[in-house]
Image: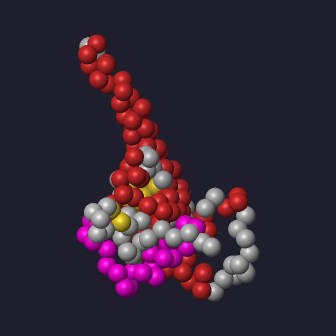
C-alpha cells in the first residue's frame, strides 16, 4: 500500500474494522444456530433449507433440516427465542432505540452506525409496534404496583417500555410517514413521528 493510500485508510480503520467484526459475528451466530438445528436431523429428512434472522450484529442465515409438512426451523428459532425473525437482544436494541429516538429512519441509521447491521425502517416499525402492544397490555394489567419507584439498576428499561407502549397506543390514530421519516415541525425542525414518540415515566 502506498503512503498516500495509507494516510487515507488509517482514519477509517476503526469504522472498517467494526463493520468487518459485525459481519463476521453475524455469520458466526448463524453457524451456531445451524449447528443446533442440524442436531435434530433424523429419518425422513428431505433436504436442507435456509432462513434469515436478525441478530444483534445484523442479518444472518440459519440452515435447518427440512421435512415435508414438518418445518423444523421453528424448533431452532424457539430454542434461541427468535420471534418475528429477531433474536431477543436484537429486538430489545431495535425497539429501545426507536422509542428513544422517535424516528424509525434515525433508528435504522443508528443501528448501522453502532454495528448492528442494516435493518429496514418498515421492519423496525413493525417490531416496535408488536413489542409495544405487549408492553401496553402489561401496563394495562400490571403484575405489581406500578407506582413503586423504579430501581436505578433498571437501566432505563421502564422508560423504553413506556415508549414502546406509546408507539402502539398511537398507531391506530396516527400513520407514520413513508420510509420512517419524521414529520417537520412548523419551525422547520425535525420532530418525532407521531406514532412513535419517546416518553418518560413520571
Q: Residue at x 32, y 74 (%)?
A: 176
Q: Residue at x 60, y 81 (%)?
A: 139
Point out the residue furthest to the front here. 187
Is residue 148 visible in the rendered structure shown here? yes
Residue 159 in the figure: left or right of residue 115: right
Residue 137 in the figure: left or right of residue 4: right
Residue 3 in the figure: left or right of residue 92: left
The colour mode here is secondary structure
- Residue 135: image location, x then y, percent: 55, 77
Is residue 91 visible in the rendered structure shown here? no
- Residue 14: image location, x then y, percent: 42, 32
Point out the residue furthest to the top here. 3
- Residue 66: image location, x then y, percent: 40, 65
Out of 151 and 112, give the one closest to the viewer. Answer: 151
Q: Which residues are magenta?
A: 159-184
Determine the image quadrant of residue 124. bottom left
Amino acid at each position: 500500500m502506498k503512503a498516500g493510500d495509507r494516510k487515507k485508510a488509517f482514519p477509517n480503520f476503526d469504522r472498517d474494522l467494526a463493520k468487518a467484526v459485525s459481519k463476521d459475528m453475524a455469520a458466526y451466530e448463524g453457524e451456531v444456530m445451524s449447528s443446533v438445528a442440524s442436531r435434530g436431523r433424523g429419518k425422513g429428512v428431505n433436504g436442507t433449507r435456509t432462513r434469515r434472522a436478525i441478530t444483534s450484529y445484523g442479518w444472518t442465515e440459519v440452515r435447518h433440516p427440512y421435512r415435508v409438512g414438518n418445518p423444523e426451523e421453528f424448533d431452532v428459532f424457539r430454542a434461541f427465542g427468535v420471534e418475528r425473525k429477531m433474536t431477543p437482544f436484537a429486538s430489545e436494541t431495535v425497539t429501545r432505540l426507536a422509542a428513544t429516538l422517535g424516528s424509525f429512519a434515525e433508528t435504522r441509521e443508528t443501528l448501522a452506525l453502532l454495528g448492528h447491521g442494516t435493518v429496514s425502517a418498515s421492519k423496525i416499525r413493525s417490531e416496535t409496534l408488536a413489542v409495544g402492544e405487549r408492553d401496553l397490555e402489561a401496563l394495562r394489567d400490571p403484575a405489581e404496583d406500578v407506582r413503586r419507584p423504579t430501581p436505578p439498576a433498571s437501566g432505563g428499561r421502564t422508560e423504553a417500555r413506556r415508549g414502546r407502549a406509546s408507539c402502539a397506543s398511537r398507531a391506530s390514530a396516527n400513520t407514520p410517514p413513508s420510509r420512517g421519516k419524521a414529520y417537520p415541525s412548523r419551525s422547520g425542525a425535525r420532530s418525532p413521528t407521531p406514532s412513535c414518540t419517546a416518553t418518560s415515566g413520571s
